[in-house]
Amino acid sequence: MSSPSTAPPDPATAVDPGQAATPPPAPPPPVQVIAMHGWGGDSRGWGPWRQATAALGWSWSCGERGYGRLEPRQPGWQPQGRRVLLGHSMGPHLVPPQLWAQAELVVLLASFSRFLPAGPAGRRLETALRGMGQRLEPLEPLEPEESQALRAQELLREFLVEAAAPAPSERLPAGPAETPIAAAGRELLRHDLERLARCLDLPDGFPERRPVLLVEAGADRIVAPEARELLRQRLPDASRLVLPEAGHALLDPALIPAVLDWIQGQVPP
């Protein structure tokens, strides 16, 4: 029996046996996260979050204010992937409106809309902010730079002890307080303390109609209970996660899995 005739291969589509086939392009990430740290922190604090989201195949990027030795950086959204904006403490108020306007999911970690509540609690906090700002200024016109940098470092260390409590501050990730604070960093810290006092509502561009998760620290020594209540009232439809024993820095191992579970529940399969 004769064999069926075979057409010669098309040179345009023939594959060289010695050449590996080009792998197909990787699928786009299902979720992209932009995260912003708060006052006195930097982007290194998101390390565990970056690892956890990488295991899920998500895209991750961080904003950087530049208080310490890291250069300021403001990331942007990619064309594909659900857009999740995650901010700690003052971080949401440091995100530009154009990023907020395109966010599809929001996670607020120990954050606030208005930092200074009305009444005695707000007045005490305002006095504390003013005192912190004064410590970032020179003691005298000719105070050496080294002295100013060390005093600012000490201020940050004291703040971080309060932010971590009741957990020990040794559990905090690396940040600007590891080294003396240069003049540019001190100016940013001072500027943002003044900005903090002016935080009266949600950040400009905040997507109020999108799903929001509020994560509250039950033992928070930085954000007053009155400010937490104001945020709950401002976003009455938001989901809530309360960590009763956690301080402002949210050093609770349950935090990251719980937040990622919530995000996954909002993302269609």
Image: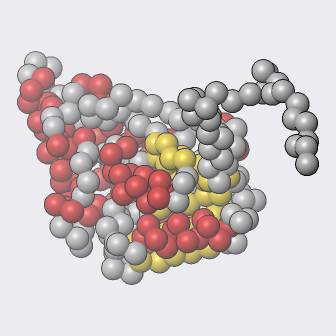
In this rendering, position of residue 66 left or right of residue 195: left
Residue 92 visible from this viewpoint: no
Q: What percent of the width, then of the height, locates residue 105? A: 65, 57
In percent of the image, x 84 and y 27: which residue is there?
8
Q: 194 or 170: nearer the eye?
A: 170
Q: Residue sitting at 75 percent across and 59 percent down?
A: 209
User: Residue 61, percent across and down?
Assistant: 49, 42
- Side of 239 where 216 appears, left or right: left
Q: Is residue 131 left or right of residue 255?
A: left
Depth order, front residue of 108/52:
52
Q: Is residue 128 left or right of residue 9?
A: left
Q: Position of residue 124 (x, y in %)?
A: 34, 60
Quadrant assignment, res 102 = top right
Q: Residue at x 57, y 29 (%)?
A: 19
Q: Quadrant of the C terminus?
A: bottom right
The image quadrant of residue 23 is top right
Outermost residue toward the bottom in this view? 244
Residue nearer the viewer, 241 or 262: 262
Height in image: 77 above or below 105? above
